[in-house]
Amino acid sequence: MQRKTNRKALAALVIAGALALSACGGGGAAAPKKGEDKPVDSLKFYNDKGGWKDAFTQVGAASKKDIGVGMEPVGYSDSNTYTAFIRSSFRTKEKADLFTWHTGKELQDLVDQKLVADTTDQWTKAVADGNIPEQLKQYFTYGDKQYCVPLNAGYWVMYYNKAVFKKAGITQTPKTWAELTQVADKVKAIGVKPFYQTNILFSFVWFETLLAGKDPDLYDKLAAGQAKYTDPGVVDVMNEWKKMIDAGDFSDPGSKTEPQAQLKNGDVAMINFGTWFSGNLNTLKMKAGTDYDFFVIPNVNPSLPKTSMIFETGPVCSAAASDHASTVKKWTDWWVTPQAQTAWANSRGDLSFNPKAEVKDPGLAALNKDVGGDGYRLINRWFEATPVPVANKALEVFGAFVTKPGDPMPGLQKIQAEADAYWAKQK
């Protein structure tokens, strides 16, 4: 009964959102005829990053000043509700002018249904101008065309509370997995949980971290359907994860307290997240380099030739049938410029995909420079690298595993069954 009630509530939210979308579009004038482009002076920007509202608002003010087109963020905090809303919006009369999404199979699904706008010409110019690195193109390319433009680009590192480290007597950040384990033990000795963990959306994080740091080739093969979740290497990772859980290394996975608050309060000492997490901490008035810092997560396997670095990039998309296509193009052309990306990066305290953006945070700027060297192997984030139905089943399994860890094989068999069904359809 509870599930039925929740479905009704979700459906009501989606319908309400779709109605709101139909009523928006900037300018408040009558809807254009089908196929007619109607320029507007402001765009709605739907996103699943409710906590980024202030940064989006600042960027909207900057675009209004620079090109005369404002941007109003419409943020959602619940990922499932947001995804359902965007998918339903394509069936409404007016489509989302701008919206955040995910690269990988999530974006491919929209491209296959011809729901998102082709941005090939914009990519060609942006790459030629040096505003988007050529290597990012692969994440937005389907067939021989590009879709959407980058929202951000981030690397996954280990954030830590500097006061907790000082209290635990930790004077240097770990350079090896063995040193990381020693740091965790010192933190536990003062009564603080070493690492953050959750049983909802980001339940995949430690699976990703352990597998990429132990066997990145297996990680890539798993994403491509060339290896199985029941392979010995994957089972070893799950057992290593369970060993850490049993050792008391993780926070309560069911906690409703936001991760940034847990780090600020000193409830946990460390959190492995993308560099976008700096912005979340900054909103709590934590100061980079003083209250928190981060370090590169060392490989689990010390014999790997390069440090595995989880990388993610998210897209800003527009519906293929947008009534405001010329305004959307004007705004997204501006969005990829150094001027816009400098404003964006510093409004959040984050990195930018545009190498010409001036990032004020010295730690982030140094990381951006270092990762561009030869010592790192970039690994596509598991959430984007994994087919949607497989990811959905895996998130369910991982959430149950961190809540009540046990023999991982039954859960891995469920994931593999979903993977077998998916990859069989791709042949």
Image (tube, rainbow, N blue to C red):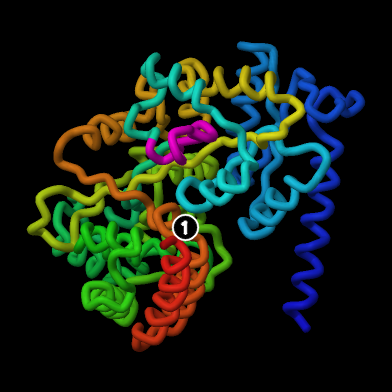
Q: What's the residue at 24%, 37% (across, down)? A: 371
Q: Is residue 233 above or below residue 334?
A: below
The answer to whether residue 362 is left or right of residue 320 is left
Q: What's the residue at 83%, 60% (across, down)? A: 12
Q: What's the residue at 21%, 56% (across, down)? A: 170
Compare residues 166 and 35 and report the one nearer the observer: 35
Q: Is residue 336 above or below residue 242?
A: above
Q: Position of residue 89 (x, y in %)?
A: 75, 47
The image quarter containing residue 31 is top right
Tag 1 residue: 265
Q: What's the residue at 29%, 64% (across, down)? A: 226
The answer to whether residue 334 is left or right of residue 142 is right
Q: Residue furthest right?
A: 30
Compare residues 276 and 399 and report the one nearer the observer: 399
Q: Secondary structure at mark 1?
A: helix
Question: What's the magenta region?
Answer: 138-152
Q: Position of residue 355 (x, y in %)?
A: 35, 23
Q: Residue furthest left?
A: 303
The image quarter containing residue 312 is top left
Please identify the quadrant where the C terminus is shown: bottom left
Residue 125 highlighted magenta (yes or no): no
Q: Residues within 10 Å of mark 1 (few under 14, many from 20)?
A: few
Q: Position of residue 298 (x, y in %)?
A: 20, 54
Q: Is residue 321 visible?
A: yes
